[in-house]
Image (cartoon, rainbow, N blue to C red):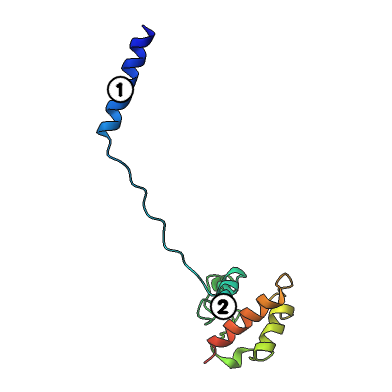
Amino acid sequence: MLIRCFIILLFINNCTQENESPKKEPPPPPAVTVPFPEAMYVQNGCASCHGMQGNGRGTRTALFANVRIPNFQDKSTYIYGSSKEAIAKTIKNGIPGTYMKAYLHMRKVEIEAVAEYIQKMQR
């Protein structure tokens, strides 16, 4: 009896495998590489206020009623200057009395990368 059950189970198992078509796994998505300065800009939340193009139209802009978010494309909107050094200092120290907080958790190389990325947005 036990042998018959085993044979029947073996037969059923083989039958179902024959009727099934082999399932192919989809290929993995292509790897995406983002330049370090852009990655730091996004990961540290700069894009959420200033926008991906730096135009001051980020996803959080609507939360700040009656607040002008600086447009990195326009050099006149920089409070402490538009040089890479001035931008880096602003990122590190923030701007008192504004929503621009100090990014003390960032390493110097990360701050410099973001400052370089922001400076490239200027026109």
Q: Please identify the quarter of the rendering in which residue 42 is found.
A: bottom right
For label 2, the SS is helix
Q: Hey, which quadrant is residue 6 in on the image?
A: top left
Name the residue tied to disc 2: 50
> Alpha-carbon neighbours of circle 2 within 10 Å: few (<14), some, or many (≥20)?
many
Q: Residue at x 66, y 81 (%)?
A: 112
Marks 2 and 1 sit apart, C-alpha to C-alpha, by: 63 Å
Q: Amino acid at mark 2?
A: His
Q: Position of residue 106 (x, y in %)?
A: 70, 72
Residue 20: image x %, image y %?
A: 28, 35
Whichever of labels 2 and 1 marks the residue nearer the N terminus, that label is 1
Indicate the quadrant containing the N terminus: top left, top right, bottom left or bottom right: top left
Where disc 1 sits, the SS reads helix
Left or right for 22, reference 79:
left
Residue 97 in sight: no
The number of callouts visible is 2
Find the residue positioned furthest to the left: 19
Whether 83 is drawn above or below 63: the answer is below
Can residue 43 be seen by looking at this rendering? yes
Please determine whether, in this image, residue 19 is positioned above or below residue 49: above
Q: Residue at x 52, y 70 (%)?
A: 59
